Image: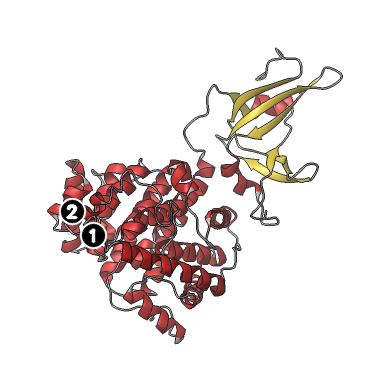
Amino acid sequence: MLCSMSTPDYKKSLVRVKEAFETTCFISFAAPYGLDEKVTLPEGMVLNLHEHVNKKGEPWYDALPIDQEAWAPLLISDMHRFDKNFRGSYHFSPNEEEIEKYFEAIADIPTETPTLLRPYHAIQGSLFGTAIGDAIGLPYEGMSPRRIKKLKAFPLRQRFFFGRGMLSDDTEHTCMVADSLIYSQGAADKFAKLLACTMRLWFLGMPAGIGMATLRACLKLWLFIPPKNSGVFSAGNGPAMRSAIIGVYASDDKALRAELVQISTRITHTDPKALKGAMIVAEMAARNAEGDPIKTDNCLVGLSEIIDDDKELEALLSKAIASAKAQQSAEEFCLQENHAKGVSGYIFHTLPVVLQIVLRHNDNYEEAISEAVRCGGDTDTVAAIIGGIVGANVGKKGIPQDWLDNLKDWPRDKTYIRLLGEELAMVKHLKKTGRSQWMDFVRLLLRNAFFMIWVLAHGFRRLLPPY
């Protein structure tokens, strides 16, 4: 037996599921409330196996998952959803035959993620990676690297509002894309209509600091111009900042990924450069989600279909790869590329910096975001794009906990982002249309009014030393 009888009444043993199997799991809310539900335990799931002894001296067993957050979406069926305040536990009682057949004893919790749980981890990591990168970079948007150093920004922490972080349009667009994927299940026509509708409502909330291309596109959407014709000729960062989550969602379907990125891009931007930048971001995120990240030795080959015959893009990316191979810092690379005042919002300026950082820090979220901020310029967008890509590789657990703890926003708070990720993971897992929280423009309007006041406060602060 896996559990010895050395203690007469209670013992815990660490076990791993060696073969996936279906069982009935009891989902406990608050005692004595709960329900039974059929679940599939994936291969690689780690459990605490509790051994008990009844009054007759006969052993019986109970099992509890180690990582409840990771297991949660597998327990939520299309018939049942938990509300945002759910903090229950999950356990089941295996018999001796199941223990011998399906479990193996282990000494420590393994670091690898079970295959069935990778999409969930990648989705949560990409959503939170985008949000945290956005919030960390936001206070330094538009600043030069020299000014950022003068302000003693490092080590980085949340600083936008008295030690708390808030989100900008980078995260909002990513959430809108995720929401549209949930309702459409990736169906192209439906995705386009839902994203257009969501952007119209978002625009009613009067968001601060949106790009001119996105502004004009939203006005055209309100004139009920179809989303395939609402974009304007621009090569800004807008499409790239919301494409990582598409890459993660459609990581196993290249054709769907390309179609969704094209829809998401053309709704605001029509310049082919914007599309190629968004496609490359989605590709890097997809490769991370699949556990096959792009590296310096296979980067150009992996991106060759997207680059096609664009010699300018190929030259820019080749420089970024060479810089990464030489282990240059991102700041040194920016100086080399004449971005001494910071990375602009032009996608062909942003993309090489993103690639250079991701190639060197794909396993280290904190260092990747720190390098993005050190470059200055469009810090929130660059950090959000990098965060969405690297987050798909390291998961939510790879993001510094204090950065997560001090993210304070409303109505798109941490709970909203977590539930969005869980629902999107379930849509991918069950292959059925899901649902998400309603985000009305009235709440957004109230939040954005406060956000704008604080953006102006930051602007006035920048008039003061140190220069």
Quarter in which the C terminus is drawn: bottom left
Rendering coords of residue 445 (x, y %) = 51, 73
Q: Which mark is residue 161?
A: none
Residue to which mark 1 is pinned: 343
Question: Considering depth in this image, is 404 or 353 the residue closer to the camera?
Answer: 404
Farthest residue to the top: give it.
6
Check whether the beta carbons of the residues at disc 1 and disc 2 lie within 8 A of each other: yes
Q: For this view, does 271 lie left or right of residue 216?
A: left
* Helix, strand or loop status at disc 2: helix
* Farthest-out residue, bottom: 223
The residue type indicated by label 2 comes to: Cys
Label 1: element kind: loop
Q: Amino acid at mark 1?
A: Val
Q: Is residue 251 visible?
A: no
Rendered image: mark on residue 334: 2
Instruction: Tell me which corner region of the image, top left, top right, bottom left or bottom right, holds residue 427.
Output: bottom right
Q: Nearer the viewer, residue 342 or 286?
A: 342
Q: Where is residue 440 drawn, in percent x and y?
A: 57, 72
Q: Dividing the picture into quarters, in which one does residue 69 lie? A: top right
